[in-house]
Amino acid sequence: MRGVFHTTRYFPNNDVCDTFCVSTAIEDLKGKVLEVAGLSELFKVLGDETRTKILYLLSYRELCVCDLAEILEMSLPAVSHHLRLLKAMRLVKYRREGKMVYYSLDDDHIVNLIREAQAHFAEER
């Protein structure tokens, strides 16, 4: 075949091609990979259930660290650790009011991601 590189290999699995065949038409897709560079860091942060819960709670209202610790039944240092990571990824922001520190979502993009994931998870197979 023209424009195709073939090497015959045998793979005993049904979920892998029996023949290694790379089309030259995929060259334009190599540049597309750069468009998602760095997203894995975001998904690593979201991969922790506690951080996802914090983001979900903050999608309803602004909360102080004490509120989050009480709701999640966690220590203040543990919640603060998660909030620092979320802040570093620009997912949450905070404001100080006297002795209190209140956290909120930096924007609604993350809520959209969570809601899409919920919809996907809820789909029946």
Image: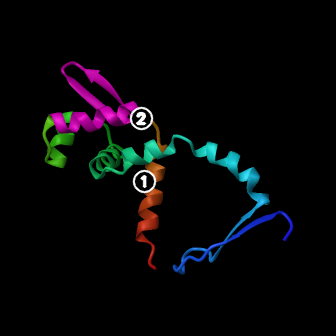
* Residue at figure coordinates x 33%, y 28% from the top left: 94
Q: Name the amino acid type tagged 2.
A: Met
Q: Hey, what amino acid is under mark 1?
A: Ile
Q: Quadrant of the N terminus?
A: bottom right
Quarter of the rendering containing residue 66:
top left
Q: Position of residue 80 (x, y in %)?
A: 23, 33
Q: How has the structure been colored for display? A: rainbow
Q: Which residue is rendered at x = 48% and y = 58% of the image?
A: 116
Q: Is residue 94 magenta?
A: yes
Q: Residues within 10 Å of mark 2 (few under 14, many from 20)?
A: few
- Whether residue 66 is in magenta: the answer is no
Residue 73: x and y in percent read 13, 48
4 left or right of 82 in image: right
Name the disc covering residue 93, or none.
none
Residue found at x 41% / y 37%: 91
Q: Position of residue 106 (x, y in %)?
A: 43, 34
Mark pair 1, 2: CA separation: 16 Å
| N-term mark: 1 or 2 | 2
Left or right: residue 119 versus residue 16 is left
In the image, 34 versus 27, the foreground residue is 27
Identify the magenta region.
Answer: 77-105
Residue 77 appears at what percent x and percent y? 16, 34
Q: Nearer the viewer, mark 1 or mark 2?
A: 2
Quadrant hosting residue 19:
bottom right
Visible in this render: residue 64? no
Which residue position holds label 1?
114
Mark 2, residue position = 89
Query: Which residue corresponds to the image point at 29% horizontal and 45% vertical from the top-left?
Result: 54
Front in this rendered view, residue 69 or 26: 26
What element does badge 2 sit on?
loop
Left or right of 95 on screen, residue 113: right
